[in-house]
Amino acid sequence: MPRVAAKEAIQASNVLPFPSKLTAKIECSDNLYFMRDLPDASMHLIVTSPPYNVGKSYEVRPSQEIYLEEQAASIAEAVRLLHAQGSICWQVGNFVDDGEIYPLDILLYDLFKVHGLKLRNRLVWTFGHGLHCQKRFSGRHETILWFTKGDEYTFNLDSVRVPSKYPNKKHFKGPNKGKISSNPLGKNPSDVWDRKTDVWDVPNVKNNHVEKTDHPCQFPVGLIERLVLALTNRGDNVLDPYLGAGSTAIAALKNDRNAYGCDIVPAYIKIAKSRIAELNAGTLRVRPIDKPVYQPL
Ligand SMILES: C[S@@+](CC[C@H](N)C(=O)[O-])C[C@H]1O[C@@H](n2cnc3c(N)ncnc32)[C@H](O)[C@@H]1O
């Protein structure tokens, strides 16, 4: 088969048809190659969790300098793909070296700012489980840097409001005295996505989680759903350049957005594609976002 035709055949096999005409372009590829094939300004949301360079099974641990250079290259390509009203969300934890921690959001912040992006939130996501540290407090939060390209950006707050704490609270003075003061649609969920105070409970994906696959550190789908709902509209394009087990693609497709993503490890792409097929068949198990976190008695 001629090379061009072969490439088209591979690409065609990677595009899964959806009844609602959604696109799922999922490939096993280094993200620089994958992103270079996509058109400028074509993505409304780019949301990802890159390797933290902490020696996970999929990481060849480079020096911090090389790690940051690699991140800079992927971020530059992602910025090229970002739609004028679009958002980039980079979800990260800490790089740990010889007991010292380096918060990756601090190290990566400038790599976005050099492109003129504007930080809208530094979201804090807390979870209940993880390593028990002996020489520092155990880490139970990670962050998401949410940047936009411009000042006009998609933000559908109403689609992610949560119930108000005091829904019957009234204005006590002024022209609206006696009227309900809170928004009937609920309140802004805030920049701390906390498992104890937030109805949108998103525990991290550990062994007993219904979404658990063989990937060592996958996103809970619910975490990304909040971003997809708030930062995109139906029919928009969502890209994850470090797709892993495909949680971002699931969050996008489940909410009628197109999904684009790649991962360098074939086994993870296989998992992602089979999860998408299960979603399509209506058999994928996803943790409901309003399910309470299990509290032992
Ligand atoms: C933190 S994990 C992402 C997990 C993902 N959020 C999920 O829900 O499964 C980082 C992923 O990046 C992939 N990866 C590392 N370097 C890559 C590269 N240059 N291009 C594409 N994927 C890469 C790894 O194989 C790994 O699956």
Image: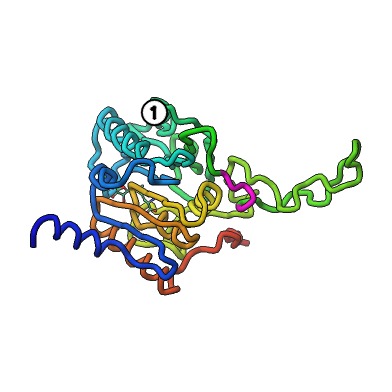
Q: Is residue 200 left or right of residue 215?
A: right
Q: Position of residue 31 (x, y in %)?
A: 27, 45
Label 1 SS: loop
Q: Main secondary structure of the magenta part?
A: helix
How packed is label 1: few (under 14 Cα within 10 Å), some, or many (20 or more)?
few
Q: Can the viewer see residue 296?
A: no
Instruction: Give the residue drawn at x 83%, y 51%.
Output: 168
Instruction: Give the residue drawn at x 32%, y 57%.
Output: 25
Q: Which residues fall within the magenta stretch?
A: 155-159
293 or 38: which is nearer to us? 38
Q: Is residue 270 left or right of residue 6?
A: right
Where does label 1 land, which residue? 115
Instruction: Give the residue drawn at x 34%, y 61%.
Output: 272
Identify the amino acid type marked 1: His
Instruction: Give the residue drawn at x 43%, y 53%.
Output: 219
- 277 inside magenta stretch: no
Q: Position of residue 218 (x, y in %)?
A: 39, 54
In the rendered view of the protein, which quadrant contains the C terminus?
A: bottom right
In the rendered view of the protein, which quadrant contains the N terminus?
A: bottom left
Q: Position of residue 11 (x, y in %)?
A: 23, 59
